[in-house]
Image: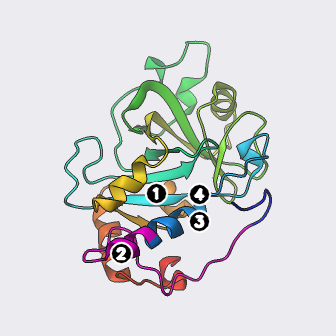
Amino acid sequence: MVAAGTREVLDLSQVPAAGSAGLSYSSRMKAIRTFWTICLLAPALAPAQQDQPANSLLLVARPSLTDPNFSRTVVLVTRTEDGGTVGVILNRPTTLALSQFLSEDLPTGSYRGPIFFGGPVMLRALVAVFRSETAPAAAAYHVLQDVYLTLHSDNIEGLLRDPQARYRIYAGYAGWIPRQLESEFMRDSWYFLPADEAIVFREKTDGMWEELIERAKRLGPRARAGDALQ
């Protein structure tokens, strides 16, 4: 556990990437432990997660993952305070209208982008990923520097009313209870890669999965931290 307000810099040069084929049990466990240590830091004393250091990763579904909810997906994930994991699928735009979710008194027409399928949990719930130079007042997960993920209606309403806001809206989200995602790593369901703002807000998501699969393959089982962050 890392104390609130601190960040840990890790050397990944000797750590195999999660999901790498042919790894021993101990190597896979080491990769899983490193995965959570790198970016899913949940300080126990923090009153609100939006005030905590940014933590997130991209999960990239391996071609062998056939679950229709996650086949060929790229998922931005972060850890919750209770040790679970939440996130949103970045590459599944829908034809849904925001007015199907919100009341008529909200400026739903101000949102010009598509609503994305965020995941199979609470499909009627809206989730926003947005950029903000200051921590939002309402609850949110700090996923990247100046980037937050929120399910809170106050945050979403504020984004809709701000013509300068940069954000993306999702219907539903992906969620894993504690230890569930680790078991999926053991079954070689996912690659993991560092998250970055360019991927999160990429305008065209066509080809995103294919691109990141190739990136994961290039990094190989013992990718260096510097290479992984490029």
Residue 109 at x, y percent in the picture: 53, 27
**Pointer 4: what residue?**
40
| Observer-nearest of 104 and 133 | 133
In the displayed structure, 227 sits above or below 123; it is below
SS of the residue under disc 1: loop
| Amino acid type, label 2 | Arg
Viewer-nearest of discs 3 and 2: 3
**Pointer 1: what residue?**
202
Residue 76 at x, y percent in the picture: 48, 53
The answer to if 195 sits in the magenta stretch is no
Mark 2 or mark 3, which is nearer the start of the sequence?
A: 3
| Amino acid type, label 3 | Thr
Mark 1 or mark 3, which is nearer the start of the sequence?
A: 3
At x 53%, y 76%, the residue is: 229
**Pointer 3: what residue?**
37
**Residue that extends furthest to the top in the rendered view of this protein:** 104
**Pointer 2: what residue?**
215
Viewer-nearest of discs 4 and 1: 4
Viewer-nearest of discs 3 and 1: 3
At x 53%, y 35%, the residue is: 127
**Circles 3 and 1 in contact, beta carbons < 8 Å:** no
Mark 2 or mark 1, which is nearer the start of the sequence?
A: 1
Stretch of the chain drawn in magenta: 7-29
| Amino acid type, label 4 | Leu
Q: Can residue 204 be seen at all in this image of the molecule?
A: no
**Circles 3 and 4 in contact, beta carbons < 8 Å:** yes
Q: Residues within 10 Å of mark 3 (few under 14, many from 20)?
A: some
Mark 4 or mark 2, which is nearer the start of the sequence?
A: 4
